[in-house]
Image: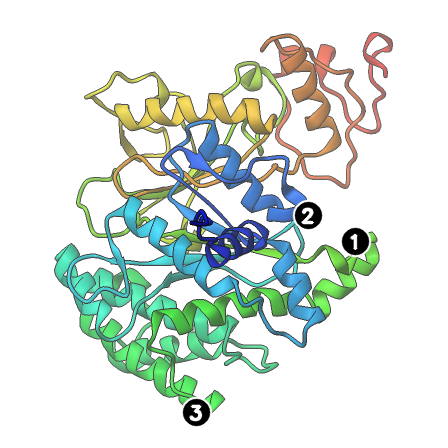
Amino acid sequence: MAAKKPAKKPAAKAKSSAAKSAPKYIYTWGAGRADGDGSMKALLGGKGANLAEMTRIGLPVPPGFTITTEVCTYFYANRKSYPKELQAQMEAGVANMERIMGTKFGATNGMPLLVAVRSGARDSMPGMMDTILNLGLNDETVLALVRATQNERFAWDCYRRFIQMYGDVVLGVQKGEDHEPFETVIHSYKHEVYHSDVEDSKLTAADQQELVKRFKALVKERTGKVFPASPWDQLRGAAGAVFGSWMNDRAIVYRRKYNIPSEWGTAVNVQAMVFGNTGDPQPRQRRQRVLRRIPHQRPGRGCRRRRAHARAGPQAQGPDAEVVRGAPQGPCHAGEALQGRAGRRVHHPGGQAVHAADAQRQAHRRRRAQVLHGYGEGEAHRLEDGRHAQPGRPARAAARADLRSGRGEEGQGHRHRPPRRPRSTSTPTAPCRPRKRARRCCWSASRPPPRTCAA
């Protein structure tokens, strides 16, 4: 009797080999783990590589995923189409965010998962697509957000912001005008109801609902299409807008000027939203941008000690941390807050009250980010509960300021004063020091510096 041969499983082998050979287009990060790292800027772009590296070193970065630059190259090489494996990998990336955040993308019960979509080229470039926040909201999920946060105004404000961003960036509502159509609608509504140009923070939940209706009508009028309601359609449209911005006129001119190859492409970063404007009466909820050094202060006795510099916007979202309509946010020093003990509340000199535990967390983040990014790295905090941080970008500095900082770092924090030069009369400067010191360290362009201080 002939021995039976073992049954072959060609189908299983074929599946496993196909899974191994499938290209990887999505790199996830979150909960202390990341598929990429800081050395993969060519594949993940500058922002995606920084997000992955910040996650690896333990910073509390909200979860998300990066669509690689290879997809952008494929997009233009194949008549603006996508790889067939991309959709399944995107669904896996969203599922990873849902698992970490404990929410559901497009959920109508409970807290829905909302995401932000950003471009991320290898080098920072002007003219790329603006950020889209609160993606995933529609007429049903906004009601779920109201129930989850118990804040009707916050939910409808997020929805209004999302329609404005998506309509402008993705749907192209603004067609060559000097003015912004959505801002025109807001302006006319304020004067129609309040007869004055009130701040956006004064608008009620009913006002936000009415603006949502008018924004949708504007989108229909300008584009001839209904605003997309499916969160997945919204996400695919936003990703396509990022890739489309790689070949807009401003980006092409910039690449040509600075010799950046068009073959590099751009990445897309999709990240879970955390909020700093849910209406918490405590000032812990805020969005702020932090620098390691004071960027605007004139060199002198006040700059001998290194101090953190922050620009805070309580109850703010997105660009509100930079400028709130009608109320510019002034800078404040975080040095005093960083010295508080956990459990106490301390105050920035700029007037922002902060819990000392949050301040200590910020100090720890900056020390770890210094190792990664070096001098002048900005860090944006979207603080929903005092824990989340966003990646920053290298701060710009004048040559003298950069030299001064480098010498200070070389001396382990001890400032080495560079040689002084005559100040130009055409450049506005800060007032001189007291007169008793004028003979030694203060002069004008008409009066040359002492021989001992000459460069």
Label 3, residues with CA under 10 Å away: few <14, some 14-19, many ≥20: few
Looking at the rendered structure, the kind of residue marked 2 is: Asp
Name above or below for residue 222 compared with residue 427. below
Name above or below for residue 117 compared with residue 168. above
Residue 89 badge: none
Residue positioned 36% across, 75% down in the render: 186
Looking at the rendered structure, the kind of residue marked 1 is: Ile
Give residue 213's quadrant in the image.
bottom left
In the rendered structure, the answer to whether residue 359 lies left or right of residue 256 reads left
In the rendered structure, the answer to whether residue 290 lies left or right of residue 150 reads right
Instruction: Indicate how the structure is coloured in the image.
Output: rainbow
Label 2, residues with CA under 10 Å away: few <14, some 14-19, many ≥20: some
Q: Which residue is mark 2?
A: 123
SS assignment at label 1: loop
Q: Earlier in the sequence, mark 1 or mark 2?
A: 2
Q: Nearer the viewer, residue 168 or 198?
A: 168
Q: Which residue is mark 1?
A: 260
Name above or below for residue 369 compared with residue 249. above
SS assignment at label 2: loop
